[in-house]
Image (cartoon, rainbow, N blue to C red):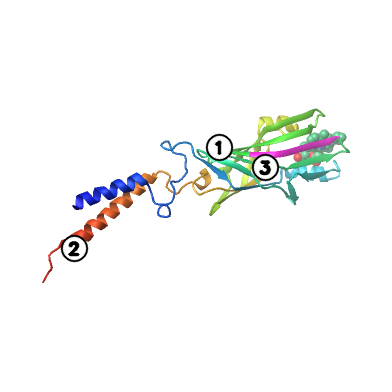
């Protein structure tokens, strides 16, 4: 009778999986045994100064220029901000897209470069790529129109990571210009250090490599099994106590 009861509990628990609110849904982490899982990014923000020396050059007496922000991008010294990011993670890789542009101008209208619509492609815990639309004129005077060019590499793991509930903040992340970015911008060489970036996004726990489950190696089925065994042990103990002869 005890054996039959135990089997029933075990079979039942394994069949239904974890009860909502007891263990929660299985974590949506990349795992060879789980199918591709997509989870939405519900908020996103970038704070980035682009390149401090370029801003000094633009606003200084050489270029006598300025920058203007549009379509949702904002500026507060010393950083540009893109907010209302949208996107998703799938199998630990994520894409966060933003609207908004920054136009640098100077030397009358000879210098005019617009950086817009940044996209951050998060590859893993270490690396992300920043893509932007680059348009305008290079230093050599060549016209450029390079949509979603692979502008810079972000070394995520070298920044500071904070996770508060569903919000992940990666700050002080080093940014290095890539070949395509260097070609589109037309002054700095690939490998040039740009200003560090801060990326903030919100996504369900366990969804991104930066807020992955504390024990991703612990499959949720194992948790269900442990819960089932604990339930069986509890029931068996209870039944044995009831069945034990009185000491009197
Ligand atoms: C009338 C035309 C231009 C003149 C006379 C000029 C002059 C200069 C000078 C003197 C510097 C050195 C600044 C320093 O070291 O402090 C400089 C730097 C630079 N210029 Fe121009 N420039 C011109 C056009 C352009 C254009 C069209 C671009 C296009 C983007 C451009 C982009 C840059 C950049 C990115 C730097 C480096 C800023 C830094 O990070 O230090 N310039 N330019």
At label 1, counting other C-alpha atoms closer than 10 Å, the crowd grade (few under 14, some 14-19, many 20 or more) is some
Q: Give me the residue at 73% from left, 45% from top.
A: 52
Which residue matches tag 3?
98
**Badge 3 or badge 1: first in the primary sequence:** 3
Q: Is mark 1 within 8 Å of ligand 1?
A: no
Q: Position of residue 165 (x, y in %)?
A: 53, 54
Mark 2–mark 1 Cα distance, whole angstroms, equals 57 Å
* Residue numbers of the magenta segment: 110-119
The kind of secondary structure element at disc 1 is loop
Camera-nearest residue between 102 and 89 = 89
**Badge 2 or badge 1: first in the primary sequence:** 1
The answer to whether residue 168 is magenta is no
Extreme-left residue of the structure: 248
Our reading of the magenta stretch's main secondary structure is strand
Extreme-top residue of the structure: 142
Q: Going by the image, does 14 lie left or right of 177?
A: left
| Quadrant housing residue 105 | top right
Disc number for residue 123: 1
Q: Position of residue 93 (x, y in %)?
A: 54, 38
Q: Give me the residue at 29% from left, 46% from top.
A: 11
The kind of secondary structure element at disc 2 is helix
The answer to whether marks 2 and 3 mark residues whose Cβ atoms lie closer than 8 Å is no
Vertical arrangement, residue 95 with respect to residue 227, above or below:
above
Which residue matches tag 2?
242
Q: Going by the image, does 144 lie left or right of 98?
A: right
Mark nearer the viewer, 2 or 1: 2
């Amino acid at each position: 009778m005890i054996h039959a009861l135990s089997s029933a509990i075990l079979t039942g628990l394994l069949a239904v999986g974890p009860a909502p609110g007891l263990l929660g849904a299985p974590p949506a982490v990349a795992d060879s045994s789980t199918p591709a899982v997509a989870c939405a990014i519900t908020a996103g923000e970038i704070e980035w100064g682009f390149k401090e020396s370029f801003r000094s050059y633009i606003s200084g007496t050489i270029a006598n220029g300025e920058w203007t922000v549009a379509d949702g991008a904002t500026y507060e010294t010393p950083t540009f901000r893109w907010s209302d990011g949208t996107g998703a993670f799938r199998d630990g890789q994520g894409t966060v897209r933003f609207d908004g542009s920054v136009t640098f101008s100077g030397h009358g209208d000879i210098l005019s470069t617009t950086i817009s619509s940044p996209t951050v492609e998060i590859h893993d815990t270490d690396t992300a790529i920043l893509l932007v639309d680059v348009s305008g004129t290079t230093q050599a005077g060549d016209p450029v129109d390079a949509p979603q060019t692979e502008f810079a590499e972000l070394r995520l793991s070298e920044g500071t990571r904070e996770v508060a509930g569903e919000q992940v903040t990666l700050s002080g992340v080093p940014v290095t210009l890539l070949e395509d970015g260097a070609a589109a911008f037309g002054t700095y060489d690939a490998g040039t250090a740009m200003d560090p970036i801060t990326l903030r996004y919100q996504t369900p726990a366990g969804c991104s490599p930066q807020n992955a489950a504390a024990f991703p190696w612990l499959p949720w089925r194992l948790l269900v099994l442990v819960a089932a065994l604990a339930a069986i042990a509890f029931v068996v103990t209870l039944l044995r106590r009831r069945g034990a002869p009185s000491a009197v």
